[in-house]
C-alpha cells in the first residue's frame, strides 16, 4: 500500500478521537504513511506507520501517488463495494 494520510481535520470525530490524535502527537497538515485501513459499517480505522493504535478516518485526507483518493469509493479499501 502506497497511501498517505494527511491530518487535515483534527477536530473531526468523537472527543476520544480528538484526544487520541493529540496524545499521539499528530500535527495538522502533516502527512503520514498508511499501514492499513479497516473499514467497518459505521467507522473506519486508519493504522499509520510508527503508531500502535488506529485513528479515525474522518480526520484525514488520503493520497496515492500525490493524487487525492476517496477510500470509501475504492473497492481496495471498502469491502462493501463489489468489484
Image (spheres, helix red, strand yellow):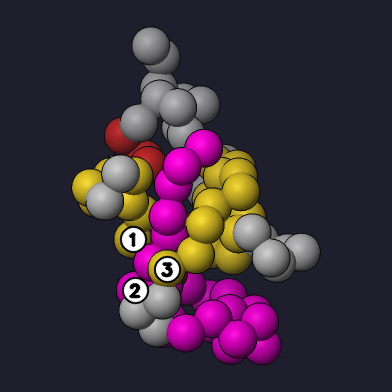
Q: Quadrant of the C terminus?
A: top left
> Which residue is identified by label 2?
8
Of the numbered discs 2 and 1, the one sitting upstream in the chain is 2
Residue 22 picture quarter: bottom right
Viewer-closest of 8 and 35: 35
Mark seen at residue 31: 3
Of tags 3 and 1, which is closer to the observer? Answer: 3
Q: Which residues are magenta?
A: 1-27
Relative height, residue 43 to residue 59 (above, below)? above
Of the numbered discs 2 and 3, the one sitting upstream in the chain is 2
For residue 9, say whether it is visible: no
Cα separation between marks 3 and 1: 9 Å
> Quick check: marks 3 and 1 in contact, CB under 8 Å?
no
Relative height, residue 5 to residue 24 (above, below)? above
54 drawn magenta: no
Viewer-closest of 18 and 48: 48
Viewer-closest of 66 and 29: 66
Cα separation between marks 2 and 1: 6 Å
Q: Residue at x 36, y 54 (%)?
A: 62
> Quick check: marks 2 and 1 in contact, CB under 8 Å?
yes
Spot occupied by residue 5 in the image (x, y as percentages of width and height):
43, 60
Mark seen at residue 61: 1
Q: Residue at x 66, y 88 (%)?
A: 23
Mark seen at residue 41: none
Spot occupied by residue 78 in the image (x, y as percentages of width and height):
46, 32
Spot occupied by residue 81 in the image (x, y as percentages of width and height):
40, 22
Amino acid at each position: 500500500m502506497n497511501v498517505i494520510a494527511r491530518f487535515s481535520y483534527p477536530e473531526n470525530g468523537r472527543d476520544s478521537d480528538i484526544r487520541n490524535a493529540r496524545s499521539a502527537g499528530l500535527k495538522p497538515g502533516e502527512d503520514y504513511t498508511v499501514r492499513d485501513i479497516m473499514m467497518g459499517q459505521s467507522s473506519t480505522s486508519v493504522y499509520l506507520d510508527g503508531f500502535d493504535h488506529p485513528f479515525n478516518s474522518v480526520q484525514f485526507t488520503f493520497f496515492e501517488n500525490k493524487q487525492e483518493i476517496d477510500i470509501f469509493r475504492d473497492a481496495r479499501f471498502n469491502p462493501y463495494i463489489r468489484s
